[in-house]
Image (cartoon, grey):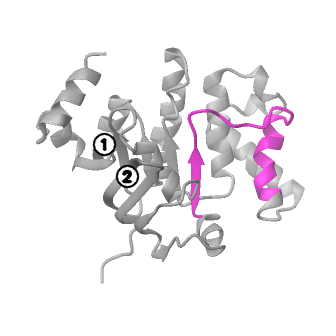
Amino acid sequence: MGEIPAIRLEQVGKRFGSFQALSDVSLSVARGERIVVCGPSGSGKSTMIRCVNRLERHDSGRIEIEGRALTGGKSDQLILRGAVGMVFQQFNLFPHLTVLQNLMLAPRLVQKQDKAAARAKALALLERVRIPEQAGKYPAQLSGGQQQRVAIARALCVEPRIMLFDEPTSALDPEMIKEVLDVMVELAREGMTMICVTHEMGFARQVADRVVFMDHGRIVEEAPPAEFFADPRHERTRLFLSQILQH
């Protein structure tokens, strides 16, 4: 028996009414592997990772986190808690809490950490995402790039083994994208298991072990970055890359 994958999807399907968002999606992600998922708008990328994190329930197929199946029952939250962190396109920070309070919330509520331990961890993570000086500020006082780095730090507060990123830079101004990607590159280098939905192809080239291309709810192609960019097998992938790499 080989090592149990961090994430495994087997013929996963998901519908929204009559719209088939995912069709027979199968993907296995090894521990420490970094996957970048790309594709046109509406191709199912975000739906796939939202199903992994139980923000959506898949209709068919099987999803496993570290060998344990997500069934739709109460056990799902126990499987996900501590294992999976997620960073969204919008930062979703609590506006009435300071940066430090935003970070301390989950360790205090979910992990029942004492205040001193939660505070120490939060400050260390703000250091890690390079904004320790923003601890006492409120989200509205920060730039978009700073807010997204706070959101990454907040996801890391519960010490997840897997991080999911859903287009984390698409709401940012161009000059702020690099500061967020730099933090993600560091995480990748530290060996974090990652699935990142993004159009940042430079990031994909730099850190991905595999690039996955989705279209119409299916995985069309997956390959190591060098192969994916230099010699895509499918016409649909070639068309997508020709459009995105021109910008």
Q: Is residue 105 magenta?
A: yes
Q: Which mark is residue 22?
A: 2
Can residue 204 be seen here? The reply is: yes
For the residues labelled 1 and 2, the Cα–Cα distance comes to: 8 Å
Q: Which residue is mark 1?
A: 216
Crowding at dot 2, Cα within 10 Å, few <14 / some 14-19 / many 20+, comes out as many
Secondary structure type for disc 1: loop
Where does the magenta region start and end?
A: 83-108
Quadrant location of the N terminus? bottom left
Query: What residue is rendered at 50% in x and 27% in y?
Result: 170
Q: Nearer the viewer, residue 147 or 214?
A: 214
Find residue 242 and report its horizontal and vertical position in percent: 20, 23
- Please state if 123 lies on the left or on the right of 62 as rendered: right
Q: Is residue 23 magenta?
A: no
Find residue 197 and report its horizontal and vertical position in percent: 42, 41
Query: What residue is rendered at 33% in x and 31% in y?
Result: 201
The answer to whether residue 95 is above or below residue 155 is: above
Q: Nearer the viewer, residue 175 or 63?
A: 63
Query: What residue is rendered at 78% in x and 36% in y?
Result: 99
- Please state if 204 lies on the left or on the right of 153 as rendered: left
Quadrant location of the C terminus? top left
- Is disc 1 in contact with disc 2, using a CB cutoff of under 8 Å? no
Q: Earlier in the sequence, mark 1 or mark 2?
A: 2
Query: What residue is rendered at 65% in x and 71% in y?
Result: 78
Find residue 196 and report its horizontal and vertical position in percent: 43, 44
Q: Amino acid at mark 2?
A: Leu
Can residue 29 be seen here? The reply is: no
Secondary structure type for disc 2: strand
- What is the count of numbered marks? 2
Q: Which mark is residue 104?
A: none
Find residue 96 and report its horizontal and vertical position in percent: 86, 33
Q: Amino acid at mark 1?
A: His
